[in-house]
Image (cartoon, rainbow, N blue to C red):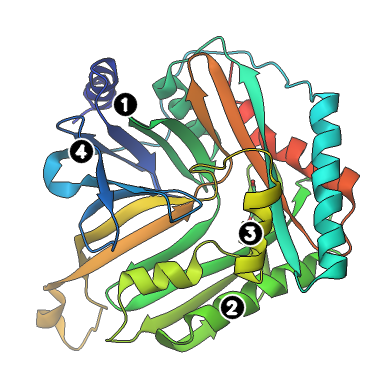
Amino acid sequence: MDEFSFFEAIEIQYANQLPFVVYSRPINAVIKCWLQHDEKLHHTKDFSESGFVFAPFNLEENSILFPKDNCSYSEIECRDLETQPFTTSEIQPNSTERLQHIELVSKGINSIEHTDLQKVVLSRCEKKALQDTNPISIFKHLFNAYKNAMVYCWFHPKVGLWIGATPELLFKVEGKRLTTIALAGTQPFNANETVKWTPKEFEEQQIVTDYITEQIQPYTEQINVSEVDTVKAGSLLHLKTKITSLIKDASDLKSIIDALHPTPAVCGFPKAKAKDFILQHENYNRDYYTGFLGELNLKQATTRNTNRRNVENNAYAVIKTQSNFYVNLRCMQLKESTAKIYVGGGITKGSNPEHEWEETVNKTKTISTVLE
Ligand SMILES: C=C(O[C@@H]1C=C(C(=O)O)C=C[C@H]1O)C(=O)O
């Protein structure tokens, strides 16, 4: 299939108000697309099905499934997509929203100082009026701009339209192998400066690493934690560790999801306390922001390790069940001609409310720089 017919099919699907998702995983020149045949809303509770999943922050609400058997699937390989030139306008941060966010962050810091809450991730939603409201053209701009993100555009007529470029893997499973990352700490990328992180940022990132390791312990074995590394996501830098392990035979995907979602990187720590704080004090519903999305239980052929002495064996591909979920960050919801951009940041006891506000303003730029 060529690029033109690939996107034409998606445009037709959207014009017919039928569900679809188009996405590209990080460092990957493949763009994939699922078109659901009807407008039915499917849910998954135990994540045992096969398809594409779109899950909310609060898993007590519904996780949506595009079932594999109800969809047409296609993919293209592509480095850069053809787009129309566009001019973007800056979002002018609003002073009431600034004060509201500063007040929310101050409440969070206060709760950390006076209870056993150690970290809470607090967020807000920024609105931007759009000139170009075509989600597929926004997706194309995002794809061209962010090669090391999971870039996606997801639509269901009964739920809405979401677009994002997330740097954060929740986890992936290939056969028995579980890979996840701990991402935290944020600073703007500056090509002329060497990167410096503060002890507060290292501490915040370490909380995430320790917590993830502890959470997966009952379900996995041979846990391996990498060194801390700096990664670039759009115009921002974060601290990251990679954690790999092997899933025990008795564990299922749902128990891994419950153990890992929502991570301290998007919720806080301890999890239940942080989640309660968010649901009580954030002044809006996160919906699918800081939820997760991705491929669920797809059978994929992987080639065997090359063993030069055993050439015959190398001819066989191994079929493995794979899932990969990304945390829904640096994302927006498109409603009529308004983009609702969702942004947040981790609050610990040393946090400064004014800096936290600025961090959220910086995070809006991932999305807003591709909007007209
Ligand atoms: C919550 C967001 O980002 C998360 C919070 C981070 C932080 O506190 O520094 C960094 C990366 C993400 O895990 C967001 O982008 O909205």
User: Circle 4 is placed at which residue position?
Assistant: 74
Q: Earlier in the sequence, mark 2 or mark 4?
A: 4
Closer mark to the observer between disc 1 and disc 2: 1
Q: Residue at x 51, y 30 (%)?
A: 333
**Residue 164: in sight, yes or no?**
yes
Q: What's the residue type where badge 4 is placed?
A: Ser
Distance between the alpha carbons at the discs numbered 2 and 4: 35 Å
Distance between the alpha carbons at the discs numbered 3 and 4: 41 Å
**Residue 123 x %, y %:** 69, 44
User: Circle 3 is placed at which residue position?
Assistant: 276
Q: What's the residue type where badge 2 is placed?
A: Ser
Residues under numbered marks 3 and 4 in contact, where contact means CB atoms less than 8 Å apart: no
**Residue 80 x %, y %:** 43, 31
Residue 226 image label: 2
Which residue is the extreme one toward the top?
Answer: 131
Question: For residue 50, what is the image quadrant?
Answer: bottom left
Closer mark to the observer between disc 3 and disc 4: 3
Left-right relation of 153 to 250: right
Q: Earlier in the sequence, mark 1 or mark 2?
A: 1
Label 4: which secondary element = strand
Closer mark to the observer between disc 1 and disc 3: 3
Distance between the alpha carbons at the discs numbered 1 and 3: 30 Å
Left-right relation of 43 to 271: left
Foreground of the two, 34 or 219: 219
Foreground of the two, 6 or 186: 186
